[in-house]
Image (cartoon, rainbow, N blue to C red):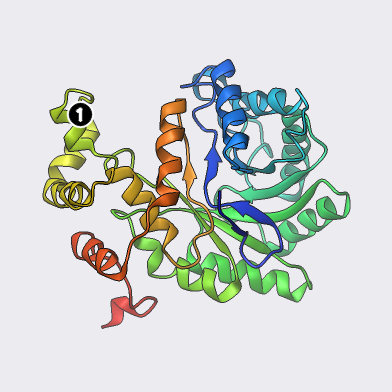
Amino acid sequence: MDYTHLGRTGLSVSRLCLGTMNFGPQTSEPDSHLIMDSAHERGINFFDTANVYGGDKGKGATEEIVGRWLATGGGRREKTVLATKLYGDMDPWPNNGKLSALNIRRALDASLTRLQTDYIDLYQFHHIDRSTPWDEIWQAVEVAVAQGKILYAGSSNFAGWHLAQAQAAASSRHFIGLVSEQSIYNLMTRDIELEVIPAALHYGIGILPWSPLHGGLLGGVLRKERDGKRRNEGRSAQAIAEHKEQIEKFEDFAEERGLDPGDVALAWLLHQPAVTSPIVGPRTMAQLDSAEKALGVSLDEAALAKLDDIFPGHKTAPEDYAW
C-alpha cells in the first residue's frame, strides 16, 4: 500500500480511503466487519463515514456498525485514521443539523458514542452552511480540538470560494482550518478542476474524490451489460445513452491496455494534482479486491492525454472559462 500526507498535514493516510456508506443498507454487519478487516490487511488505514449514513436502517446505523467493529479491539482503532461528517438533519427538531456551535457539539458527542471512540481524526462538514458564520464554526471546532475530541477538520461538497472563506476566517484566528475536501470527481465529472482544485492546491487542502467510478459508469458498464452481468435501467440507462460514445472509447482504451476500466478510472484520479485518496465504497469483498488493483496501474503522459481527449476537463483552470 502507498501512503501520502493528508493535505499539508503530517498525517499519513493510504492512497485509497474505505468509504462505508453501503455498510448497513447494502452490506450486512458481519460482511462489513470482514471488509474492514480486509482493508487493514491490505494496508488501508483511512476510513470514511458520516452521521447520516444508514439508509433504511436509520441515520447513524453505519457509524454504529463501524463502532462495534472498532470495539472488538486488536488495535483496530489505533490503526485507523477515522473520518466522519456532520451537517444533515438527524431528526426534524431544530438545531439537530447544519453547523451551529450547538449542533457541532451535540453531533460530535453523538458520533463519538456511536463510533465507540473518544476522538475522531478527521471531522468533516458535509455541506456548506450559508447561515452560520465561520467564526462560530471555528470557535466550536477549536473547543473540540482543545478537548481532544477531534484532530483535524475537513469539508465536503464545498466550492472554491467556500474554501477561501473558511481558510481566511481560520487564518485570522491563527487556526489551521480545513485540511481536506471531499468532492465528486471522476473522468466524467471534472467540474472541481475549475475552482476547487486550484484553491485546494493554494491552501494545501487534500482532495478526497467520492463517486470515483461515477455510479459504475466507469467500471465497464457496457461490457457488463453485454456479458449479462448488469441490467441498466432508469437513470443509469439514460446516463449511458447520453455518454455512450465516450464510454465505448474509454472501455476500448482500457481493453487495448489489458486493464479493467474501473482500475483505469481510479488510477487516473491518483495521477491528478491535490488528490490524496479516492473514496471507494465496496458493497462486497470482490469490489474491494478490484479497487486495490488500481494502485498498480501507471498511466504515462500519452495515456493521460488520451483520457483527456475522451473526457475533456479544465486543465487551464481557474481561468478556463475566460479563454
Q: Which residue is farthest bottom?
A: 323
* Along the viewing direction, whichever of 240 and 35 lies nearer the viewer: 35
Q: Which amino acid does label 1 sit on?
A: Asn
Q: For residue 129, say whether it is visible.
A: no
Tell me residue 322's x, y (percent).
29, 81
Q: In this view, does 301 lie to the left or right of 184?
A: left
Most foreground residue, 51 or 68: 68
Quarter holding the C terminus?
Answer: bottom left
Q: Position of residue 60 (x, y in %)?
A: 63, 27
Q: In this view, does 137 lie above or below 63?
A: below
How crowded pointer 1 is (Cα within 10 Å; few <14, some 14-19, many 20+) is rated as some
The answer to whether 116 is drawn above or below residue 86 in the figure is: above
Identified at 16% across, 48% down, the residue is 243
Farthest residue toward the right? 147
Residue denoted by label 1: 232
Q: Residue at x 19, y 60 (%)?
A: 310
| Residue 231, image x, y percentages | 20, 24
